[in-house]
Amino acid sequence: MTAATAAGIGSAYLALCVLSGWVIVRRTREISLVAGSVWTMFNVAHFVFHMSHLDEFGSADQFGNIVSLGASLLLGLVLLVPERQPPMTAAIGR
C-alpha cells in the first residue's frame, strides 16, 4: 500500500467518523439513513476489494478479513432498518 492510498483510506474513515458523530448529536431518521447508506456503500466497496485479494493472506488473516469486514458491512445495514414503533396500547377504562 502506498502512502497516498493509506492517507486516502484514513481520510475516508475520518469523514465517516464525523458523519457518525453528527448522527449521534442529531438523532434524526433522515441523517441515520444517510449515514447508513454512506457506511454501507463504503463497506461494500471495501469488502469486495479485500475479498478479491484474499489470496495475498494466510488462512488466519483471510478469516479475520471476512469476519471483520462482513461485520462492518452488516453494521452499516443496521442503520437502514426502519425504527420499530412502540405498540399501540389499549385505552384503560373504556
Image (tube, rainbow, N blue to C red):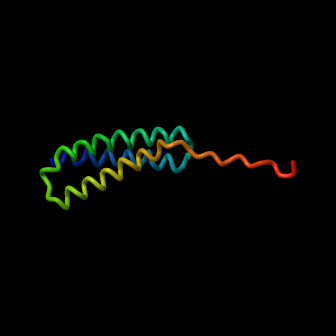
- Percent x, y of residue 18: 42, 47
Question: At 29% across and 49% down in the image, what residue appears?
Answer: 10
Residue placed farthest to the bottom in the image?
A: 60
Between 55 and 4, which is closer to the camera in this rendering? 55
Question: In the shown orientation, is residue 80 left or right of residue 15?
Answer: right
Question: At 47% across and 45% down in the image, what residue appears?
Answer: 79
Question: At 22% across and 46% down in the image, what residue appears?
Answer: 51
Residue placed farthest to the right in the image?
A: 93
- Percent x, y of residue 80: 47, 42
Question: At 39% across and 39% down in the image, what residue appears?
Answer: 38
Tally of numbered discs: 0
* Residue 44 sits above or below residue 92 on the image: above
* Residue 3 sits above or below residue 31 on the image: below
Residue placed farthest to the left in the image?
A: 56
Task: State which quadrant residue 77 falls in.
Answer: top left
- Percent x, y of residue 74: 39, 48
Between 58 and 41, which is closer to the camera in this rendering? 58
- Percent x, y of residue 83: 56, 45
Question: In the shown orientation, is residue 93 left or right of residue 62?
Answer: right
